[in-house]
């Protein structure tokens, strides 16, 4: 917060305004403007949990109650990201350089790979989902290098915002499903959840549907968002940006690996470690509804995509 406020103070000293629309016409390229943007970016990246400033996110999300974890992952970390998008693409556009945008993109790529690998290593379900948030947030930051080329910007922006909405629904569904499982089983140790589908099929199905969106499989909203981002990489002015495409494809495979790690135990034959109590129907169907939204967003994304493209000056 202190870094962000320092950047705001420097911005006001330079331009005599903090209005985002007015800043777009007053900020000029130079060291002071770059320093102001760097300070605000560092503070917002810490709040958003971008690698390597993510150290607070997995412990906070995994230790909070399930409904709170759902809100933290679905909404709270998205606020700083939305401010970053407006600062980089609107207010401080004259200051942004290709090197700076690519640096943010590389941090996002590292988050995708590192977060997914850490999720694969976890033995507790809630920690796995928390590290998955670190990985999925990385996709959002690929917007900054992809949006440098003006013809690709509307496609990249649309993809990032659709992915943001799909991730919010999917991650809320996952944390609520995990909360239902912990409520019934009394723990979230993955290896001790064999046969879970025989006891809590709705919660497991909600987890699987949410995982479908995280992996980027059609027809989910996660697939549409990633498809748009990859389309922006292929339409980039400096040729196809194969690095970003490879990172997105590899991240999808890693996401499938940690989702299947959970489902591999859930779909086995029941044993003594499987929970005997059933979850509340209202709690289970709430998680299922959020997962259904994450998938349904891919089927109903044409209208919001056209609206976003039109407002960005592109063509549907």
Image (cartoon, rainbow, N blue to C red):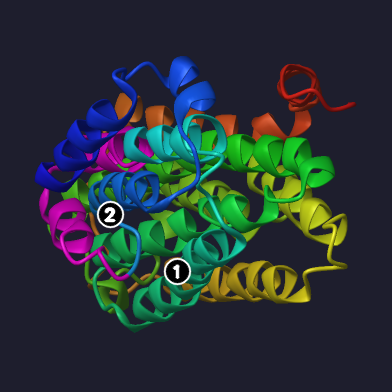
Q: Position of residue 309 (x, y in %)?
A: 77, 25
- Front one among 212 and 246: 246
- Marks 2/1 in contact by CB < 8 Å: the verdict is no
* Gap in angstroms between the C-alphas marked 2 and 1: 12 Å
Image point 46% across, 51% down: which residue? 207
Q: Which mark is residue 42?
A: 2
Q: Position of residue 224 (x, y in %)?
A: 74, 43
Answer with left or right where residue 232 lies relative to residue 177.
right
- Front one among 289 and 98: 98
Q: Which quarter of the rendering shows the N terminus?
A: top left
Q: Residues within 10 Å of mark 2 (few under 14, many from 20)?
A: some
Vertical arrangement, residue 72 with respect to residue 108, above or below: above
Q: Residues within 10 Å of mark 1 (few under 14, many from 20)?
A: some
Q: Which mark is residue 206?
A: none
- Range shown magenta: 52-78
Answer with left or right where residue 269 lies relative to residue 218.
left
Vertical arrangement, residue 312 with respect to residue 124, above or below: above
Image point 33% across, 65% down: which residue? 131
Instruction: Look at the image and say whether residue 277 sits in the magenta stretch.
Output: no
Q: Position of residue 22 (x, y in %)?
A: 46, 16
Instruction: Look at the image and say whether residue 74 sits in the magenta stretch.
Output: yes
Prevailing SS of the magenta stretch:
helix
What residue sits right under mark 1 in the picture? 107
Mark 1: secondary structure: helix
Say whether residue 219 is visible: no
- Front one among 140 and 287: 140
Q: Nearer the viewer, mark 2 or mark 1?
A: 2
Pointer 2 or 1: first along the chain: 2
- Front one among 68 and 199: 68
Mark 2: secondary structure: helix
């Amino acid at each position: 917060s202190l870094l962000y406020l320092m950047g705001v103070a420097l911005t006001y000293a330079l331009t005599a305004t903090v209005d985002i629309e007015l800043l777009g016409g007053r900020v000029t390229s130079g060291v002071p403007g770059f320093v102001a943007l760097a300070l605000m970016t560092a503070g917002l990246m810490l709040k958003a949990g971008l690698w390597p400033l993510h150290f607070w996110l997995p412990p906070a999300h995994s230790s909070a109650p399930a409904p709170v974890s759902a809100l933290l992952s679905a909404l709270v970390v998205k606020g700083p990201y939305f401010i970053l998008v407006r600062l980089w693409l609107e207010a401080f556009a004259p200051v942004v350089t290709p090197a700076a945008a690519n640096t943010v993109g590389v941090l996002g790529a590292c988050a995708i790979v590192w977060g997914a690998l850490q999720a694969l290593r976890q033995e507790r379900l809630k920690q796995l989902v928390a590290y998955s948030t670190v990985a999925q947030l990385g996709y959002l930051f690929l917007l900054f290098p992809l949006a440098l080329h003006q013809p690709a910007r509307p496609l990249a922006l649309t993809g990032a915002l659709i992915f943001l909405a799909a991730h919010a629904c999917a991650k809320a569904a996952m944390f609520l499903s995990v909360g239902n499982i912990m409520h019934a089983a009394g723990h979230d140790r993955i290896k001790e959840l064999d046969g879970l589908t025989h006891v809590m099929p709705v919660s497991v199905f909600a987890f699987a549907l949410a995982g479908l969106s995280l992996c980027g499989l059609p027809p989910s909203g996660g697939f549409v968002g990633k498809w748009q981002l990859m389309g922006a990489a292929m339409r980039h002015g400096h040729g196809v940006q194969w690095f970003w495409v490879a990172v997105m494809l590899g991240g999808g495979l890693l996401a499938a690996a940690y989702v299947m790690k959970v489902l591999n135990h859930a779909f086995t034959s029941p044993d003594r470690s499987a929970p005997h109590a059933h979850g509340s129907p209202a709690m289970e169907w709430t998680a299922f509804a959020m997962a259904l939204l994450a998938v349904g967003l891919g089927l109903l994304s044409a209208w919001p995509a056209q609206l976003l493209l039109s407002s960005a000056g592109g063509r549907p």
